[in-house]
Amino acid sequence: MAGAAISRSGIGAPVDRVEGRLKVTGAAKYAAEFNEAALLHGHAYASRITKGRIAAIDPSAALAVPGVLDVLTHENRPDLPLLRRHYQDEVASPGIPFVPLWSDKVLFAGQPVALVVAETAEIARYASSLLEIDYEEEPHETDLKEALHRAAAPWRTRKGYVRPKSRGDAPTAFEAAAVRIDGEYHLMPEHHNPMELFGTTVVRHDDGRLTIYDKTQGALNSRNYISKIFGYGGDEIQVLSPFVGGAFGAALRPQHQLFLAVLAARHLERSVRVVMTRQEMWSLQFRPECYQWVKLGAEPDGRLAAIVNHAVTNSSRLETYTDNIVSWGGMLYRCDNADLEYRIAETDTMTPGDMRAPGAATGVNLFEIAMDELAYAAGVDPLELRLRNYAEKDEMHGIDYTSKALRECYAAGAERFGWARRVFEPRSMREGRELIGWGMATGIWEAMQSKTACRATLRADGRLEVATGTADIGPGTYTMMVQVAAERTGLPAERIEAKLGDSTLPYAPVQGGSWTAASTGSAVALACETLRTRLYEMARDLPDSPFASTGIDDVRFEDGEVVRNVDPMNKRMRFEAILEAAGCPELKVEETAKPGMISMMRKARNSHSAVFAEVRVDEELGVMRVTRIVSACAAGRIINPKIARSQILGGIVFGLGMALEEESMMDHRLGRFMNHDLAEYHVPVNADLFDVDIIFVEEQDEEVNPLGVKGVGELGVPGTAAAIANAVFHATGKRIRDLPITIDKLL
Amino acid sequence: MEAGISRPLPGIEDRHAVPIRLTINGVERQLDVAPWTSLLDLLRERLDLTGTKKGCDHGQCGACTVLIDGRRINACLKLAVTLDGADIVTIEGLAQGDGLHPLQQAFIRHDAFQCGYCTPGQICSAAGLMAEGRARTRDEIRELMSGNICRCGCYPNITDAIEDVLKDRVSEPAMPV
């Protein structure tokens, strides 16, 4: 590399978040916080039935409330395009996307069927309670258990779906195996529940242009969605989302508040804000419920002879949502025979959607409980079992990994946790009235990269801006961009500004799947390298240049200066001096970083982890506490260890919720989620978290992408719930195959 | 912090409005508020003090925590008309000029936030907790901060940050090793 000095703020430095001050002072503004004097407020009214049609709507009482401007319904809404492709966003599942106020049909509980627009949010909400709607109800089917008999392999799949690939003859090998386990595993539906309510503020300008502040994981995705539906040209709308109050996948796809706010703003020719209620967010997408059946057959020493892994999740009648559930165990372990099958069953619900570590959170955690059962059936230590079945390759596809330091994760995690002191027998450790259990599991996620563009602009004052249309929903993207730019240009971080969350910036995909560090990071690096080259050439070509007749390898870039390797004290020039001497007010470059397609197909790219958990269970009351977690992760190069640790920590907290707390419970007679608020849908709180120890093992990977990073947003979830469930078994001797493990299941 | 837009009352609210006097972040204000307006909506929608967050509007998440006469309270559960004469401090009022409050500094140092949405509530809650004088140990901090949900899962870092300020120390942030 052409001599960029590693600065204290570059890649690998544990710097504080660059936007930290804005967030701790309340100055960071989120979508529903851009205020305008003449703003109107919309409140979406949710259907009271789950399936059927609206026979009649009488809005007169709502319209009679002073301060109400309009009630929009399917009967009076403006005309909309007829073809489904107008409504398909960048990450839509195949099918017909749900469009609010489309027709009289009700397709799922909580479907928004009217928008009341008023001068204040309180008036809109109150007036919506006066809407009189007659429904014609039809019978609904929402219970996945009842729908299992009609589950089928998905006939249309989305981008990123990995068709499970079986090998050998697993059913026969299972029957012949010396050690066997066979179980049904289950996960309840979960809802994302980011802390920020979904909201959109549409500011309508006098000439009809719109500035849209949206809660989204992709400003460009929202922009393109609205443009296609309403026929806007390139510069007529701008979507901004500088800060996003969490999303976890819930804001990958445009949500109904965006559509409704734009619809109302156009119709009334006013600025409009629509914010959801917390309850309303249970009518959005969710992590689908899953039944998974696992049969494992092994030699007496625990070496796998057969993996049979079948699973069913639900999808909606609108779209075909698929998850990668059953492939993980088939990839992770050496075994000649694997029978992997994934099916979906349509139910009368909203289409499920990606939620942090989609597929792997469900599939890996349930499978790793089965692996623990196998360890006990074979009488082999659970960690030893995984080592005996360790795979150097992706066993499902039979291809090498770009890197896989999972063995090092097992070793480092076990050492830190003190796993060697564990007594194999369940119920063998206790302190007072608490039983103590130690469990472990393996985690795995994908290391993806997506095409992303970045613009780098060096200004006359020597400050650099790096800009791309990605989002920062909390993983530290602003900071990551600054650090990569600092390393590549040798500029100190204080002189670099990252811009994102703006649909007018260069293309970036939605933020998700842990691909942002690799994708955006690579784009920033590439743009900065080009900028550096252009700057050097500019300096070299100056009259009396200190770099005359040199090549780029003869100089280095440090602290805002180009410095010649020979005679560095005299042969150097500041960036701003170069621009000034060349008469260039600013130097602007744009580059697009793409993954290498051939290499993508030839090798598997995954991050891995080994998770160890300690639980304490009150023997009489069944109260469980997760008193210790050690997670050892192999995720390639770590750009910022402080922030990356927080990402894994957040994933672990999600895993803890999955293990012990989170479940959306539906009353199938009504077809509706009943515990639709944060008092009844339990998420982990501070008192649930004790010691969490996170390790990043060394993993050099020159191949996965130019930066060698694998992403850490999802990796904390897969494995964590299983390690906790396995620790509960070790503490109590009770094997719970149904997550979350609530007290009633334990007693 | 700029004053922002102070929105006038729409017609219907004007007819029912009740005059109150509030001190918000040291500034005394005369306000006419509709009887159904929560303190949270007053702050966010009329006074442009959007640092106080709405996460549930039901007192279940703690994102709207502010200090009323020094006590931490969910602003979504307080009707503004009931607060005549009260002294209110929001996240915008914690810093002294350019100098951040020690809790704000500690939250940055310990990376005690990710998306940042629950953060103002966490910090105001922590300020209230310190004034209560009840938290002495990590376990007490964890228990007494459990009314503030952080979906990004920063809890151990939040506890570290608060413990630092309680003990008047500056400790190193937790690092992966």
Image (cartoon, rainbow, N blue to C red):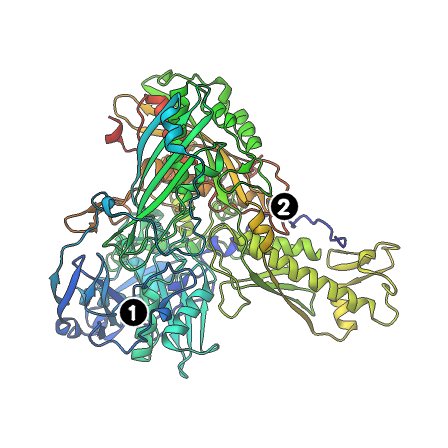
Q: Taking B8 as reference, is A552 above or below it?
A: above
In the foreground, A382 or B75: A382
> Where residue A114 appears, x then y in whole percent?
22, 68
Determine crowd level at label 1: few under 14, some 14-19, many 20+ residues with C-alpha closer than 10 A. many
| Nearer to me, B153 or A588 | A588
Which residue position is annotated with label 2?
Answer: A13
Cα distance in 3D space between marks 2 and 1: 44 Å
Q: Amino acid at mark 1?
A: His
Tell me what residue is drawn at x 87 percent, y 65 percent. A548
Asked whether residue A465 appears in the rendered view, the answer is yes
Is label 2 in contact with label 1 (beta carbons under 8 Å)? no
Callout 2 secondary element: loop
Res. A696 mark = none
- What residue does disc 1 label? A41
What residue appears at the point 40 percent right and 64 percent down from the top-left corner?
A89
Inspect the image, locate mark 2, and give the three-letter code of the amino acid beneath it. Answer: Ala
Coordinates of residue A238 in the picture (x, y in percent): 46, 72
| In the image, residue B118 above or below residue A424 | below
* Chain containing mark 1: A
Locate residue A420, reporting x and y percent.
51, 19
Helix, strand, or loop for circle 1? strand
Q: Chain of mark 2?
A: A
Name the one closer to the observer, A166 or B45. A166
Where is residue A443 shown, x and y percent of the image?
A: 47, 37
Q: Quadrant of residue A110?
A: bottom left
Q: Is residue A119 above or below residue A144?
A: below
Q: Residue A433: which quarter of the image? A: top left
- Counting residues from the start of the chain, the first of labels 2 and 1 encountered is 2
